[in-house]
Image (cartoon, coloured by chain):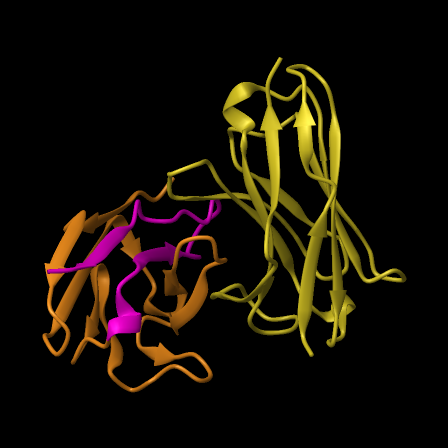
Chain colours: A orange, B yellow
Amino acid sequence: EIVLTQSPGTLSLSPGERATLSCRASQSVSSSYLAWYQQKPGQAPRLLIYGASSRATGIPDRFSGSGSGTDFALTISRLEPEDFAVYYCQQFGNSPYTFGQGTKLEIK
Amino acid sequence: QVQLVESGGGVVQPGRSLRLSCAASGFTFSSYGMHWVRQAPGKGLEWVAVIWYDGSNKFYADSVKARFTISRDNSKNTLYLQMNSLRAEDTSVYYCARIRVPWGSFDAFDIWGQGTMVTVSS
């Protein structure tokens, strides 16, 4: 099983700042099979990034993904108030299609 | 519009069974692989099971293997999760989710249902 470890667990920033969230895999994952999701309280997750760096339909360009092998990152260039949420990475390289434990992005 | 709607959740005693349904609309259901994902209260997301678009392959998380069964009825545009021998640790919101690309390899879930709560308690 591929274990995804996200860091930090909680990130406290202010609107307008830049956020960088990390996702590290216990073994190499093809970039084609790494996705990022955003989840707000009481809502289902929303797809942000697939294939490590491709934005999903309707996702603002302030969201970007990068990385390869075992190290991936989600960057939000300028935080908007609606971006404060929990973010998860997920791998589809091998079943089980595991998620990271999440990073909570909170307002400072 | 493209939509997934789960149903069938509720409160059930340990050891009992429950069947969840996920009704799909707005897209060609029979062309997409489908998954179940769950989330325990206050916890992260856990992948549960997958079924290929034609039902030919199914895979499960170790935590539910031999207890849960994923299935689909493409004539009814519906996905199912039969949950047997339920345990307290199965208490979660259960989401169904669609794979982004029809027939293709799995790379992301682009459509999610709103979730249905399952509580296992005596």
In the displayed image of the protein, which residue is found farthest to the right?
Answer: B75
Residue that appears at 70% across and 58% down: B5
Residue that appears at 24% across and 53% down: A104
The magenta-colored residue range is: A81-108
Magenta span contains residue A24:
no
> What is the count of numbered marks?
0
Residue that appears at 48% across and 65% down: B108
Residue that appears at 47% across and 83% down: A57
Q: Pinpoint residue A23: horizontal percent, then vertical percent.
A: 23, 56
Taking the image as shown, residue A73 lies to the left or right of residue B115, namely: left
Taking the image as shown, residue B64 lies to the left or right of residue A87, namely: right
Q: Would you place residue B120 above or below residue A30 in this image?
A: above
Q: Pinpoint residue B78: horizontal percent, then vertical percent.
A: 79, 56
Q: Quadrant of residue B122?
A: top right
Which of these two is toward me, A89 or B122? Answer: B122
Q: Quadrant of residue A39?
A: bottom left
Which image quarter holds the N terminus of chain B?
Answer: bottom right
Taking the image as shown, residue B103 lies to the left or right of residue B37, namely: right
Q: Pinpoint residue B77: horizontal percent, then vertical percent.
A: 81, 62
Q: Pinpoint residue B75: horizontal percent, then vertical percent.
A: 90, 62
Q: Would you place residue B113 above or below residue A81 in this image?
A: above
Q: Would you place residue B71 above or below residue B66 in this image?
A: below
Magenta span contains residue A102:
yes
